[in-house]
Image: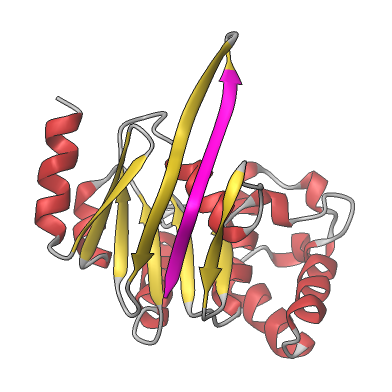
């Protein structure tokens, strides 16, 4: 369960204040994989980052009775001066999981070869994304937050990424931002639509998609 209590968030753009989350009160159900839909600039990534604790809300709070991931593949979770291996060991200690087990999983999954032991600042954006995705999948969460992060790398790596993510969803929920509706339908069973700072929940994913498409015409 994730509950938003009077949640608000605004920011300034070109001298104007834009409200992307407006006094939001809503409880998201347990055990659902939700598509977070909305037009460009609606605040979808902002909402995910607030849920993850990456950025603060202006007011209100997010309450959950389970563990929530950082946004899957989020580059901000990596320290660029540390090696990939050092980043993984640090995160393992923070989350209290077995260091060697997580390191072995991420090293094998991310397919970085010797680069796993080089500083992250030497990585390409794709390498950082693969390390971040592997790190996210290596820790078991009750809810995974996903922002356009299941299509990194070559086709073989993409298939592997989607397979492990689907496996995690057998015992977890997700909130997914993805403009590819085919992938949304592949992974999600319900939907939430963010429009003008308000969030509407739909148990039927197709109803959420229909509203989203009407809003973006």
Q: Residue 10's spot in the image, x, y percent?
A: 55, 31
Q: Residue 191's spot in the image, x, y percent?
A: 24, 57
> Residue 133 lies in what quarter of the image?
bottom right
> Residue 73 lies in what quarter of the image?
bottom right
Q: Looking at the rendering, in which quadrant would you find the N terminus?
A: bottom left
Q: Is 6 within the magenta?
A: yes
Between 106 and 187, the one lying in front of the other is 187
Q: How is the image coloured?
A: secondary structure
Query: Is 95 displayed left or right of 28 in the figure?
Result: right
196 is higher (above) or lower (below) than 159: above
Residue at the image point whose x is 18% and y is 31% from the top: 215
Span colored in magenta: 1-12
Residue at the image point whose x is 59% and y is 27% from the top: 11
Query: Is 129 displayed left or right of 158 in the figure?
Result: right
Between 9 and 88, the one lying in front of the other is 9
Q: Is residue 153 visible?
A: no
Residue at the image point whose x is 72% and y is 87% from the top: 97
167 is higher (above) or lower (below) than 189: below
Between 155 and 26, the one lying in front of the other is 26
215 is higher (above) or lower (below) than 175: above
**Count of residue discs:** 0
- Looking at the image, which residue sits at the far right? 81
Specify the principal SS of the magenta part.
Answer: strand
Q: Residue 177's spot in the image, x, y percent?
A: 38, 50
Residue at the image point whose x is 19% and y is 52% from the top: 182
Query: Is 33 displayed left or right of 69 in the figure?
Result: left
Q: Looking at the rendering, in which quadrant would you find the C terminus?
A: top left
- Looking at the image, which residue sits at the far top? 15
Q: Residue 209's spot in the image, x, y percent?
A: 15, 47
Q: Is residue 167 visible?
A: yes
């Amino acid at each position: 369960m994730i509950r938003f209590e009077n949640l608000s968030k605004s920011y300034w753009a070109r001298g104007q204040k834009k409200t992307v989350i407006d006094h939001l009160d809503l409880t998201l159900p347990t055990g659902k994989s939700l598509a977070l839909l909305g037009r460009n600039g609606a605040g979808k990534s902002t909402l995910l980052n607030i849920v993850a604790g990456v950025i603060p809300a202006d007011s209100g709070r997010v309450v959950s009775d389970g563990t929530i991931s950082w946004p899957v593949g989020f580059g901000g979770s990596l320290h660029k001066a540390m090696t990939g291996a050092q980043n993984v060991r640090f995160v393992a200690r923070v989350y209290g999981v077995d260091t060697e087990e997580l390191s072995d999983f991420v090293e094998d999954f991310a397919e970085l070869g010797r680069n796993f032991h080089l500083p992250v600042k030497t990585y390409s954006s794709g390498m950082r994304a693969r390390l971040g995705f592997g790190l996210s999948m290596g820790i078991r969460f009750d809810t995974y937050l996903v922002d356009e992060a299941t299509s990194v790398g070559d086709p073989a790596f993409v298939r592997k990424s989607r397979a492990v993510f689907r496996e995690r969803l057998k015992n977890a929920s997700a909130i997914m931002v993805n403009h590819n509706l085919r992938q949304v339908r592949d992974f999600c069973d319900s939907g939430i639509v963010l429009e003008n700072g308000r969030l509407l929940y739909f148990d039927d994913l197709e109803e959420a998609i229909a509203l989203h498409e009407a809003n973006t015409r």
